[in-house]
Image: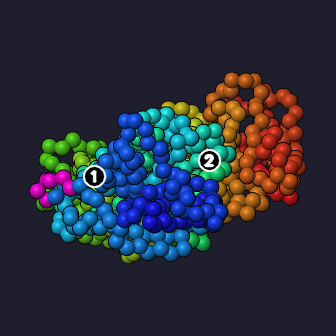
Amino acid sequence: MTQSWRLDDGRQTIVLAAIRERLPQVIYWGAPLPATEDPGTLFAAHALDVTGGMLDENPDLSICPEAVRSFPGQPGLILRGQDGTPLLPKFCFAAEMSEANALALDYDDAENGLRYSAEIALDPDTHVLTLRSRIKASEPVHLHWLSAPVLPAPQLCDEMIDVAGRWCGEFQLNRTPWSPGIRYRENRTGRTGHEHFPGLIVPVRGATNAQGEAYAFHYGWSGGHRMIAEELPDGRRQVQFGHAARMETTAATEFQTAPLYAVYSSDGLNGCAVSFQRHLRDRIVTWAKPDRPRPVHYNCWEAVYFDHQLPVLKDIADRAAALGAERFVLDDGWFGRRDDDTSSLSDWEVDARKYPDGLDPLIRHIHRLGMSFGIWFEPEMIYPDSDLHRLHPEWALGSEDQILGRQQKALNMALPEVRDFIFGRISAILAKHDIDYVKWDHNRVLPMPDAGQTRGSYALIDRLRAAFPGVEIESCASGGGRIDFGILSRTQRVWLSDSNDALERLKMQSAAALFLPAAITGSHVGPRRCHTSGRTLDIGFRAWVAAQRHMGFEMDPRELTEREETVLREVTAWWKANRDWMMAADILRLDSADPAVIAEQQQARDGSQFVVFAGKSATSAQIAPRPLRLTRLEPDARYAVELRNRSDASQLARGAPALKTRTIEVSGNWLMHHGIVLPWSFPETMWVIEGRRL
Ligand code: DGJ
């Protein structure tokens, strides 16, 4: 060994070391090591033995494994020269820059004219590692694959958890056993996608939400990613993340990955989740007005769809404001001749048939009600049957005979003239009106993956944000099709799903909390009978599920009964009274003894208060509720614990658990090791338990 580097944040240590001039390997990543630990000894002790059937030395599992050094697994970089000849890079140390908590390393391949650079930074507060790699070439080259700096995965780990999904069913967690070979996930749809959220969790054997060791990864890129989790024949495991392969459509002299975010936790999956939640909220998202409380939204989509009538919208706005809404979002249907989803995208001018005096009368009305105004766009799209397409057929991405999505094509965002055109149209609307919010939709996948498209979308959003710094943006793509830290460095909210079904949402929100904090996760109270599932749910359940995240309404308020209005007003008032601390709280997923109960504890950063949401997603197998253990409390502190919505108890709940009638005062240890005993409840209901440290 000739070189080593180490980063520490009190919770974890990561050590890299290299033999002579070669690329370094991560030889340790986990619980903090003493400062006195000798890297040379670690390196020597980390080396694996060799037996029959093996090479005489085990090839390095470096931060960019090189095929040419006999590496038996997937290499970290695959390139071709301009004439198509495969290049087989072999790098040699060139330079380093190391600061407290950050490291930049450069390696050269003189023969092929290449420089590989890796950046690794460790945030001492959020405990998130940010890793990125870059390749520079003296002559243009074709990039097939570039991984962010490669990290090892532990061998004391039986399975990995990754995230799949679909429209109206985002954030489905999959557990897959580790086995020799690769688990390869690649999203070739050109957007982050419902199907393959770019995240991975590797729990060490025995880890749960609240305890044990776990590692987690997220790739912050909106154009589709590739993940490789590979076990080599010698047992070592590597995790690679990068853009989907072959996304770069032209030869170039420089390529880089998006940031890979990685975290180690010694207190369960929640340790990873809290790190990601805090890092996203406090480091990645740039808030338009950081001190402004998150406003309660009203979104008119499921109330009126494309049928915009001013008197109806005004009436709906009056009712939404009376229920507690603070921002009115005018969804799809206000522009062009948009009476359905077959026309008008890219024609971003107000529809004079629906709004003869423009948007001003509606906006004035909404402002008079004390609400701010937001508006929907789907900027990256065009219809084949449109004047714009006839004028500029070359602006559309993909071939003439491509399969359409929602009848539309995507614009080629890599073209500056396309970006100028959309910027002009959107900025004309934003400059003319007092608008503080844009819901930015993207309803089809691309005809093929193309990194230039994603960079173009980013550039357009960046330009609009610079021109209108007070405007917040919500990232939506048929619900949760574009959720990642890349888009979230430019936007402030995600539309998690087109499903406003509270039962589906309860599950999705719980899984999404592994990566997303409440402040950026939109959640709306939907119609009584859900439009996307056909399920009918009580207002109490719908309202409390929305109150778990950034709350809003999306039903037609004219359908609400008096009782429904009262419940919704009350839950909204509760949310407003608590949002200041809840929107900055940690979401801790609870290990529920009853699989029918999906529960989480939202806890203030200083530990002084918490709220537990215990949602009953199905009928329980056993007849009485099982105690629900809380987490991360002070063992000896005393807590006042109260069932906020005890009046919701059903008449079939006939017993006398204390929480049904009064506030209890108990220790942190009792709450964590016995657990709270809740009243019996129907499925599709939510208990809300508030706690204060005394
Ligand atoms: C898909 C979004 O996810 C919906 O919320 C809505 O905005 C529609 N598009 C509008 O077309």
Q: Is residue 255 left or right of residue 202?
A: left
The reply to whether the residue tagged 2 has its Cβ within 8 angstroms of ligand 1 is no
The reply to whether the residue tagged 1 has its Cβ within 8 angstroms of ligand 1 is no
Identify which residue, 489 or 267, lies in the foreground.
267
The answer to whether residue 330 is above or below residue 556 is below
Q: Is the magenta stretch mostly helix, strand or loop?
A: loop
Instruction: Tell me what residue is drawn at x 34 percent, y 71 percent.
Output: 94
Q: Which residue in the protein does label 2 denote?
A: 213
Identity, as a three-letter code, of the amino acid under mark 2:
Glu
Give the number of the disc on residue 68.
1
Instruction: Tell me what residue is drawn at x 54 percent, y 70 percent.
Output: 101
Residue 25 at least partly seen: yes
Front of the two marks 2 and 1? 1
Give the number of the disc on residue 489.
none
Residue 634: % across, % down: 80, 55
The answer to whether residue 156 is above or below residue 476 is above
Identify which residue, 306 or 178, lies in the foreground.
178
Q: Examine the structure image and report whether residue 614 is included in the region drawn in magenta.
A: no
Which residue is farthest left? Answer: 83
Nearest to N terminus: mark 2 or mark 1: 1
Check disc 1 and report its element: helix, strand or loop.
Answer: helix
Count of number-bearing discs: 2
* Image quadrant where one finds the N terminus: bottom left
Residues rendered magenta in the picture: 82-87
